[in-house]
Image (spheres, helix red, strand yellow):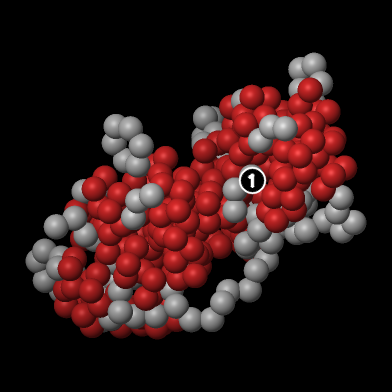
Amino acid sequence: MALVSEILTKLTLSYGGEREPKCPTVVPVYDFNPEEDAAKIETAIKTKGVDEQTIIDILTKRSCSQRSEIAFEYEKRAKKDLVSALKGALSGSLEHLILGLMKSTAQYDASELKSSMKGLGTDEESLTEIVCSRNNEELKEIKKVYREMFKKELEKDVSGDTSGDVAKLLVALVQALYDAGVKRKGTDVTTWISIFSERSVPHLQKVFERYKRYSPYDIKESIRKEVKGDLEKSFLTLVECLENKHLYFASRLSDAMKSKSVKEKVITRIIVSRCEVDLMKVRSEFKKNFGKSLYQTIFEHTKGDYQRALLNLCGGDD
């Protein structure tokens, strides 16, 4: 049985608890005038060569609900859907970013999950990142929105598109983890998952701290020794998100901008999906751990209109 759908059902148990405080970099603008914004965007789209800067400076500095109001006013004025107009006016990474902003955070996550399962092969990395890093409330909303958008159940799509191993995500109580893992030959992954899925995040965070009393390795070292490939990446992602989700996102952003070929898809997905949630905390972890601000790193590794949009969403230098 492909157990990947268990991630979606069981993780909702693990990410329970109090609502997480929001630390966004994009907030509703004061003195908001949707009619005026819609008129400016209409002019920008009609301009010969397209005035990308105006489109960027309006849509990256408005909240999701404000963008919805702009879209409503735009359609009243132009007798055309704003998303369709933006598709026609923009291209490449900038188009993907701006169209992402026109969705709610849950709609964007649902769309990214769908696209990670499109075509030949599954983008396991994107799938794992989204599923393992969202909390209970976020996952519930993503599943609901996915059903509304695609008329399908997310669990079914995921389980039909991934191998059983990638589904086997992680971790158990200290002794059970050790007994099922490094203490014996061959890891009992099912034990790891079943115990993990019944424990809360704070509980598991304490488990990781105390794991070394039972094992000569920390939890991540144990995972690296016991499992390989996509399954290893999935386990490690989950542990990193449980230990410090904002550091996980910061590390993903840092890795995406390390090589000569910048991973724009990863950068866009994290910045767009977190800018109205907790990007301020991600920025803080980035500066603390990588010796340079996220703003400066984006400035050095991207260019043009795409860079301008990312820097606006980043919300300032640290």
* Residue 230 visible, this angle: no
Taking the spot 46% from the left edge, 45% from the top edge, the residue there is 112
Residue 34, given in percent of the width and then of the height, sits at: 82, 48
Residue extending furthest toward the top: 48
Compare residues 142 and 150 and report the one nearer the observer. Answer: 150
Name the residue located 48 percent from the left edge and 63 percent from the top edge: 141
Q: Residue 295: image x %, image y %?
A: 71, 47
* Label 1 crowd (10 A; few <14 / some 14-19 / many >=20): many
Residues 164 and 156: in front is 156
Residue 198 is left or right of residue 268, and the answer is left
- Please tell me in which quadrant of the rendered image residue 286 appears: bottom right
Residue 132 percent coordinates (x, y): 40, 61
- In the rendered picture of this protein, how many numbered marks are placed on residues? 1
Q: Amino acid at mark 1?
A: Leu
What residue is rendered at 36% in x and 69% in y? 11
Q: Is residue 142 visible?
A: yes
Reply above or below: 273 against 200. above
* Residue closest to the eye, 279 or 283: 279
For mark 1, give the secondary structure. helix
* Of 309 and 150, the residue lying toward us: 150
Quick one: which residue is furthest to the left in this view? 185
Q: The N terminus appears in which quarter of the rendering?
A: bottom left
User: Eyeballing the image, is 150 above or below 168?
Assistant: above
Which residue is painted at 25% across and 77% down in the image? Answer: 195
Can you identify the residue that label 1 sits on? 101
Residue 96 is left or right of residue 131, and the answer is right
Q: Give the quarter of the image for residue 115.
A: top left
Locate the C terminus and report the quarter of the image it occupies.
bottom right
* Residue 201 to residue 227: above or below: below
